[in-house]
Amino acid sequence: MVGSVLEFTVSNARLSDGSLYDFVFSGGLISRAGALGLRGDLDADGMLIHPGFVNIHTHLDKADLLSRMRPEQFGRSLEENRELLKSFKRDYSEQEIMQRAGNVLDEMIAQGCTAVRTQVDVDPTAGLAAVKALSKLRSLYKGLVELELCAFPQEGVLSGEKRELMEQALESGCDLVGGLPLVEKSDEERKRHIDVLFEIAKSHGKMLEVQIDESNNPSDFMLPYLAEKTISEGYEGKVTATHCISLARIDDATAARTIERMQKAKMSVIITPSANMITRFPETAGRPGNSITRVKELLAAGINVAVGTDNIRDIFYPLGNCSMLRELHVLASATRMTGAGDFDALFQMASVNGARLMGLDYGVEAGRKADLIICNGASARESLNGFPYVPYVIKDGRVVAETGVSADVSKD
Ligand SMILES: [Zn+2]
């Protein structure tokens, strides 16, 4: 079903507070919302209507590389994986990246994502091939999904060439600066990596999203440095820390002190639940502890916490079906977020909180963007417990996916 571009109506949709609303969409926005007594183009049948899912952290350029790997290449060490990735990248073509990334983006839309931020590898091996491919994909999917590109230095930023490539990526369409201190060799170099990210971000006026402390090794703890640097650079409100696994592994007093500094730095946090749960680099000895960060404490401190799928079926993570419902299931279980209000908070993290990072005005009130999902359940809890699919996905006020399948909507 493809709604009228001019105006589309939905009736009998349930808000998270239980009330039933009707909606009129026009010009890509919610133009009216309330008990309007109208018969909608679409009857939501009392199911939950919610701002669309925002997959705030994924790697579309690498997505589905698993389909090109041989079974003996699965589950290797981090070092071997990085070398394998380089061998794929040497053969990258824009068309091949667009095909893999486009197929996975279709899956994300069908599962309720109305906005996606993807990391894009920028390094001497691939150059700007992935940036060019995903920029084209963004134009192709205009009106179907908001796509944001984060320049990601998979091989580091410490040489002049690597830094230059990051600058070029920002001038070629990347929206923000990504980071990966772990790729550098020593703590000193990891700090320098963070310093360079700030220099690049500030000179281009861009926000920063840094993958940090993801090795599930508590001594890998760069988060305090990132928070202090954010404050000393006057970059409050512009920095996001993704993963932050070590925060869950260190003692409570250090964690509380760190969260206080993150609060002062107005940092956001991104969690990628499924990928985080299997994080245990082979070179880290011992039984893995909890690899999901301290979500409840961060939320209690007023920190914006958002959710992404991270890698989808690639060298670093062999699973992934693009379902944000699946991610929330894992997150609820890992964090024991099963109390009153927790299910609504989980849905917020997977939608409105991510939208905030992308500068999108998400909500169910008149005037907000008409990017919404109608769920398979009358509440967040029911939707998580129902058969895991999203019956209707509405982007810019029209239905772009139905019953888990992308609608036949032409790409511009
Ligand atoms: Zn990632």
Image (cartoon, grey):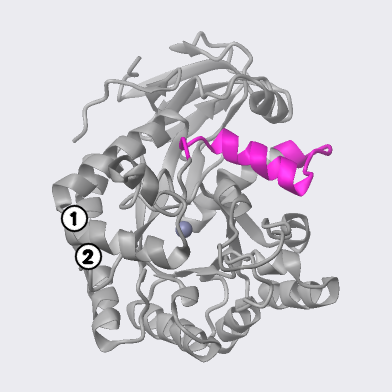
Q: Is residue 341 magenta?
A: yes
Residue sitting nearer the eye, 150 or 368: 150
| Quadrant of residue 126 within the rendered picture | bottom left
List x then y, in percent, for residue 153: 36, 71
Residue that appears at 67% across and 57% down: 291
Q: For the N terminus, give its image quadrant.
A: top left
At label 2, which amino acid type do we have? Ala
Q: Is residue 132 highlighted in magenta?
A: no
Which residue in the protein does label 1 denote? Answer: 92
* Residue 126 in view: yes
Image-based side of 319 in relation to 218, left or right? left
Residue at 59% over, 11% down: 45
Residues packed near mark 2 inside 10 Å, few (<14), some (14 to 19) or many (20 plus): some
**Up-down relation of residue 155 to residue 392 (above or below):** below
Callouts 2 and 1 close, C-beta under 8 Å: yes
Mark 1 or mark 2, which is nearer the start of the sequence? 1
Residue 126 is labelled as 2
Q: Secondary structure at mark 2?
A: loop
Task: Measure the C-alpha gap from mark 2 to mark 1.
Answer: 7 Å
Q: Position of residue 243 (x, y in %)?
A: 58, 62
- Label placed on residue 205: none
Residue 285 as seen in the image, left or right of residue 11: right
